[in-house]
Amino acid sequence: MPVPTFSATLAQAAAVVVAIAFVTFAGLMVHWSLGRTWGLSSHWGGRYEVLPTSLRVADAISFAAFTFGAFVVIGRAWSLDQIASEGFFTAAAWSFVALMGLSGIMNIASSAKWERRLLGPSALVIAALCFIIARSEWTGG
């Protein structure tokens, strides 16, 4: 059975949702990498009241990844071939399908209540939306 190709319109709607989520996550990563503590109980297994430097650096890297992810899903859904090729956007979109799927599984396996109940299922929904984006029709030149 062949894997379906989704319409550009559906991919664009999915990309808006994913980009908003990624930009929100990126903002939280900046917040925590600067040493702020709001919401920290739902992050890194809820084990820290203040993040150690190594995890702040990890959050700064996560900021870059989520920002890149927002660029990728928008670029793929709107076929922005004047910025990068279809192959680049498609491969990058598939990487976010995998990353968010893995994130969802890891968060569901976490001992932290908020990671299990909110972040895990949210990551799996985002992975599914990234799948739609990666399998959508390319309307660029």
Image: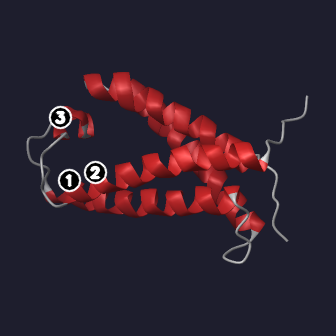
| Mark 2 surroundings: few (<14), some (14-19) or many (≥20) residues within 10 A | many
Label 1, label 2: how far apart the Cα atoms are: 6 Å
Q: Secondary structure at mark 2?
A: helix
| Number of residues whose C-alpha sits closer than 10 Å to that of mark 3, classed few (under 14), some (14–19) or many (20 or more) | some
Check residue 116 in the rendering and tell me which mark sits there, or answer none: none
Residue bearing the label numbered 2? 28
Residue 4 lies in quadrant: top right
User: Compared with residue 97, is residue 114 higher up or lower down, i.e. above or below?
Assistant: above
Tell me if label 1 and label 3 are in contact, CB under 8 Å.
Answer: no
Q: Is residue 69 toward the left or the right of residue 88 in the image?
A: left
Q: Which residue in the structure is indicated by mark 1? A: 32
Query: Disc 1 marks which amino acid?
Result: Trp
Question: Which is closer to the viewer, label 2 or label 3?
Answer: 2
C-alpha span from label 2 to label 3:
13 Å
Q: Nearer the viewer, residue 84 or 61?
A: 84
Residue type at the position of mark 3: Ser
State the image quarter where residue 29 is shown.
bottom left
Image quadrant holding the C terminus, namely bottom right
User: Which residue carries the number 3 mark?
Assistant: 41
Locate residue 70, reporting x and y percent: 51, 58
State the image coordinates of residue 120 (x, y, percent, origin top left).
Answer: 42, 29
- Residue at figure coordinates x 66%, y 76% from the top left: 83
Q: How many marks?
A: 3
Residue type at tag 2: Leu
Residue 109 shows up from this direction? no
**Percent position of residue 36, x then y:** 12, 53
Q: How far apart are the two marked residues, 1 and 3, measured between alpha carbons?
A: 11 Å
Q: Are marks 1 and 2 in contact (CB under 8 Å)?
A: yes
